[in-house]
Image (cartoon, rainbow, N blue to C red):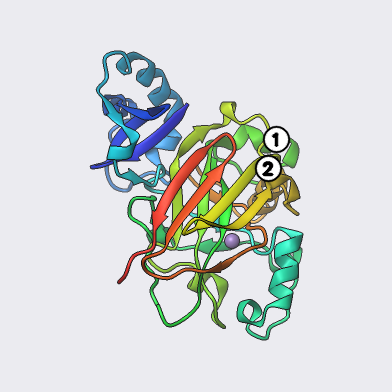
Amino acid sequence: MKLCRFDDDKLGLVRGEEVLDVTAALDAIPAVRWPLPQGDPLIAHLDAVRARIEAVAVGAEARPLAEIALKSPVANPSKIIGAPVNYQKHLDEAQADREINVGKEIKTIDYYGLFLKANSSLVGPSEGVTPRFPDRRNDHECELAAIIGRAGTRIPREQAFAHIAAYAIGLDMTVRGSEDRSFRKSCDSYSVLGPWLVTADEIEDPDALDFTFWVNGEVRQQSNTRHLIFDVGGLIEYASSFYTLLPGDVIMTGTPEGVGPVAPGDVMVAEMEGIGRMEIPVRAA
Ligand code: MN
């Protein structure tokens, strides 16, 4: 099932080039009051919402995909987790390019561990990316994103897939510079998730997905998730060895080679096998 959040926080069921408005299915999410439970309520109750979608999809209004504004399919993650240098060829380019490494030695993911991006950086493709410091280098990083469905801590990799609700395409936008990674990657709009979530039952093997990323029609990144150094199961084991994963947590799994700068006016396009394609404008502040 492909589910999107669109326009004014409507819930959409993606069917080819159309979206069925299944917002009524959100009634399956229990009402909450302060203090809110941790985690994203839609993802935490996804099974109940899916069951309801089957019922409300019959006779639901259909809208052309081209006419709707796509928001992040996860609205309230408790955390957005990033994986630094998780493709060998990106490690190689980061070590070779002084504009990326800013004179620092680039080590490996098992040296750095993972990092967190501010939840306030999260947007959907329609909102676009707004470079916070247009005079500095602002890079795209196109990545597979795994969305946690079931809470867990100290999850062994053999059980990792039981904790995944869905997948999406993630953009881990980055200001290059000397500051800590989590700071440079947490500007408003520097985490893009979309175009929708694809429930895990539709992705047979997340560690074998082709993906391509274009800027203004030019291919910048092209790889397959089989080249991940820490694969999806390994990342869940690694992340949950330090903290509890909650429903709606987003794991951006790392980017391959080909990262590069974008500027206002550019149009980014990301496409991933089994998920779909999204267009993300780079906006002026
Ligand atoms: Mn990244």
Element type where label 2 sits in the image:
loop
- Residue at 28% from the left image edge and 47% from the top image edge: 34
- Residue at 61% from the left image edge and 57% from the top image edge: 221
Marks 2/1: CA distance? 6 Å
Q: Residues within 10 Å of mark 1 (few under 14, many from 20)?
A: few
Q: 270 above or below 203? A: below
- Residue at 53% from the left image edge and 62% from the top image edge: 116
Disc number placed over residue 149 in the picture, else none: none
* 123 horizontally vs 84: left or right: left
What x and y, as percent, mark residue 83?
63, 59
Q: Nearer the viewer, residue 89 or 190?
A: 89
Pick out the residue farthest to the front. Answer: 217
Kind of residue sitting beneath label 1: Gln
- Residue at 59% from the left image edge and 38% from the top image edge: 273
Q: Which residue is mark 1?
A: 159
Tell me where residue 164 sits by quadrant.
Answer: top right
Kind of residue sitting beneath label 2: Ile
Q: Is residue 236 visible?
A: yes
Q: Mark 2 near mark 1, Cβ–Cβ under 8 Å?
A: yes
Disc number placed over residue 155 in the picture, else none: 2
What x and y, as percent, mark residue 95?
73, 75
* 95 horizontally vs 56: left or right: right
The quarter of the rendering in which ligand 1 is drawn is bottom right
Q: Residues within 10 Å of mark 2 (few under 14, many from 20)?
A: many
- From the Cβ of disc 2, is ligand 1 less than 8 Å away? no
* 194 horizontally vs 258: left or right: left
